[in-house]
Image (spheres, rainbow, N blue to C red):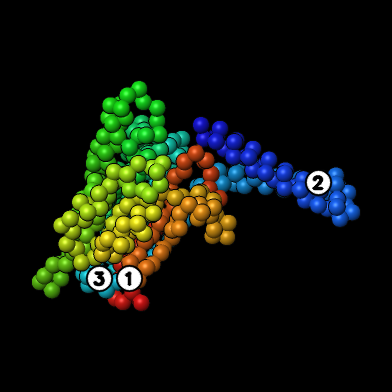
């Protein structure tokens, strides 16, 4: 299926480029130049898309980038000054079937950071729970002092697979939930957990809040309940895991006091040019760190792929976030 989508994409790009070459040649003819000479001179551009796709498929999708970010906030308790979080997203295990060694290297890189916590913001699978068969032993090796916390993304409800009945879909979605719990991950389904540290004969805490998928885009179903998820979260510094970054502006910023929101979902369309992606026409926040006052959003562009098995200018991402106590200014 991925090959079919890639072929269609390549064909569409080739047709668009051929049309542009034809238009340029026609304009040059009006300026007194030979049409066919100008047309043939522009044909070399048609080599760019297939070469870029080959590069993205065999080179860049196997080159993981590790991005380091400091989040400075007065709400970070002193006991958590220097707290290290590894944020990962959109593993899409189907991407690693047949290339499990690449996933194993990613897990090793994450563990090498010696994180205090690993936070995963959804889309563990692409189609269904069978993707765990050759990958579950690798994922089970993820380690962090305070554990792994995860949420569900739009793919984790098994809607991207043909099922004979709704009952079978729900059963598969339950298997995805169950597998994460088998790993020992703290899967947050509209709920929260507190992490506590002792300091000066007292205790300080931060809260990890996780919602099920919430999206402003109608093609993606929403199951999340932020009010329910945040209820009782008493940590001085609050971190929200929500798969779709559009949730930040529509509900998180106007209705909560959550300090840091972590998302994924966009993949930056698995391609950027000079740091820009075409997905910016759909998502205002689609890659990296964003700040509004003393509130933060980080959008991780993911580790796996959907539809097209390549990445160009958007390497698989591991984000290392260090919390610092102090003024956000």
Mark toward the start of the polypeptide (2 vs 3):
2
Residue 198, quarter of picture: bottom left
Mark toward the start of the polypeptide (2 vs 1):
2
Residue at (68, 40) in percent of width and height: 15
Residue at (37, 68) in percent of width and height: 292
Mark 3 falls on what kind of element?
A: loop
Residue 85 visible in the shown view: no
Q: Are marks 3 and 1 in contact (CB under 8 Å)?
A: yes
Q: What is the CA distance from the residue labelled 3 to the residue labelled 1?
A: 9 Å
Mark 1 falls on what kind of element?
A: loop
What residue sits right under mark 1 in the picture? 294
Residue at (60, 43) in percent of width and height: 54
Residue 6, percent from left and from top: 57, 38
Residue 113, percent from left and from top: 35, 58
User: In the image, which disc is placed on residue 273?
Assistant: none
What residue sits right under mark 3 in the picture? 75
Mark toward the start of the polypeptide (3 vs 1):
3
Q: What is the CA distance from the residue labelled 2 to the residue labelled 3?
A: 62 Å
Residue 309, percent from left and from top: 52, 41
- Left of 96 or right of it: where is 250? left
What residue sits right under mark 2 in the picture? 39
Mark 2 falls on what kind of element?
A: helix
């Amino acid at each position: 299926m991925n090959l079919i989508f890639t072929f269609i994409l390549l064909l569409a790009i080739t047709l668009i480029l051929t049309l542009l070459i034809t238009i340029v040649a026609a304009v040059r003819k009006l300026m007194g130049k030979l049409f066919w000479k100008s047309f043939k001179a522009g044909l070399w551009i048609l080599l760019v898309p297939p070469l870029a796709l080959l590069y993205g498929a065999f080179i860049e999708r196997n080159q993981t980038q590790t991005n380091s970010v400091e989040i400075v906030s007065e709400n970070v308790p002193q006991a958590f000054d220097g707290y290290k979080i590894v944020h990962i997203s959109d593993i899409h295990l189907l991407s690693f079937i047949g290339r499990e060694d690449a996933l194993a290297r990613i897990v090793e890189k994450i563990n090498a950071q010696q994180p205090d916590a690993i936070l995963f913001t959804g889309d563990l699978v692409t189609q269904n729970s069978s993707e765990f068969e050759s990958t579950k032993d690798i994922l089970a090796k993820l380690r962090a002092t305070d554990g792994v916390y995860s949420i569900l993304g739009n793919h984790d409800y098994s809607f991207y697979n043909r099922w004979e009945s709704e009952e079978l879909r729900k059963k598969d979605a339950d298997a995805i939930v169950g597998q994460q719990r088998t790993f020992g991950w703290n899967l947050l389904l509209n709920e929260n957990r507190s992490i506590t540290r002792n300091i000066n004969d007292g205790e300080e805490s931060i809260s990890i809040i996780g919602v099920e998928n919430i999206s402003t885009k109608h093609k993606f179903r929403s199951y999340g309940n932020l009010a329910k998820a945040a209820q009782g979260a008493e940590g001085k510094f609050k971190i929200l895991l929500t798969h779709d970054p559009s949730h930040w502006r529509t509900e998180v910023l106007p209705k909560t006091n959550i300090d840091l929101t972590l998302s994924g979902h966009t993949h930056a369309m698995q391609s950027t040019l000079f740091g820009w992606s075409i997905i910016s026409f759909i998502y205002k926040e689609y890659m990296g760190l964003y700040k509004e006052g003393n509130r933060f959003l980080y959008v991780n562009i993911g580790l796996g792929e959907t539809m097209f098995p390549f990445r160009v200018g958007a390497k698989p991402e591991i984000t290392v976030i260090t919390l610092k106590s102090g003024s956000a200014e």
